[in-house]
Amino acid sequence: MLPLDEGPADLTVDRIHQRRALREQVDDRFRQADWDDAVGRMDQVKRQAYDMIRSGRTRDAFDLARESPQTRERDGGNLHGSSMLVNRRLVEAGVPFVSAHAEVVIPHGFMDDVHENNCGLLKGCNLPVLDKCYPALIEALAQLGLLETTLVVVMGEMRRSPKVNTKAGRDDWPQCGFCLLTGGGVQPGTVFGATDEHAAYPVREAVSPSEIVATIYHLLGVEPTSP
């Protein structure tokens, strides 16, 4: 996700066609070795992806100059807020799957590495950014009538240890974490599962990363068990 007022100048239509031609050459070699239904389905998805990239509506979604200053400020007026605003515009344009990633940019974005000064980074950077851009995204989707058909997922690739280290930070901890789901038919206010008193291990209704992915696939219309 590139939260810019304009698209990247170097990613021209010619470059997209060059990349597609190179990819097709590689795919042709694979077809010579092995052709099956899975490869055919993959080709269809790739064609849809290229059509989406070429779509004027998709390109226009990245033009945040079309949004009012009030809307830009509501989303935070920073890197991550702009990314979330582009996300909303892409959903409006019909893009079925979009994402915004945390950036290590202070004070204009998230600091995802909190091995040091965990509380200071959360209080001074991460939480104020999230508290502004996340509700703005949800409210905008609801006003547009898109929230019930859009699943918003807030999560990270690594959880944090319940024990604070010697640098006032929290280290990697894959044993237990959380995932926030909004929209997409999710019942508001629902808390599923529970941890022990230290938030170190799940004690009830544990959910694996693969089950979260399966949920997303299901809502995208993709059978999670398909090859």
Image: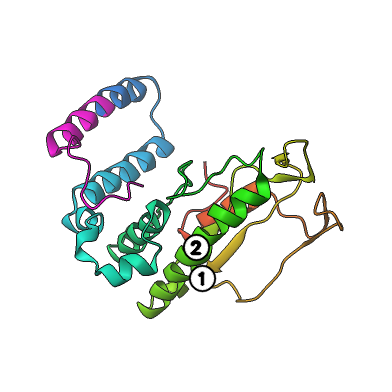
- Secondary structure of the residue carrying numbered label 2: strand
User: Hey, which quadrant is residue 12 in on the image?
Assistant: top left
Crowd around label 1: few <14 · some 14–19 · many ≥20 (10 Å): some
The magenta stretch spans residue 161: no
- Secondary structure of the residue carrying numbered label 1: strand
Looking at this view, is 52 or 126 the one in front? 126
In the rendering, at what x and y percent does residue 88 appear?
Answer: 36, 63
Q: Amino acid at mark 2?
A: Val
Res 152 label: 2
Looking at this view, is 45 or 124 the one in front? 124
In the rendering, at what x and y percent does residue 181 appear?
Answer: 58, 64
* Callout 2–callout 1 Cβ contact below 8 Å: yes
Res 183 label: 1
Say above or below: 187 vs 151: below
Earlier sequence position, callout 2 versus callout 1: 2
Crowd around label 2: few <14 · some 14–19 · many ≥20 (10 Å): many
In the rendering, at what x and y percent does residue 95 appear?
Answer: 33, 57
Distance of label 2 from label 1 (alpha carbons): 6 Å
Q: Amino acid at mark 1?
A: Gly
In this view of the protein, can residue 172 be seen by the observer? Answer: no
Q: Residue at x 40, y 53 (%)?
A: 98
Q: Residue at x 32, y 65 (%)?
A: 72
Looking at this view, is 192 or 34 the one in front? 192
Colour mapping used in the image:
rainbow
Segment colored magenta: 1-23
Q: Residue at x 46, y 74 (%)?
A: 148
Query: Is 24 positioned to the left or the right of 205 in the image?
Result: left
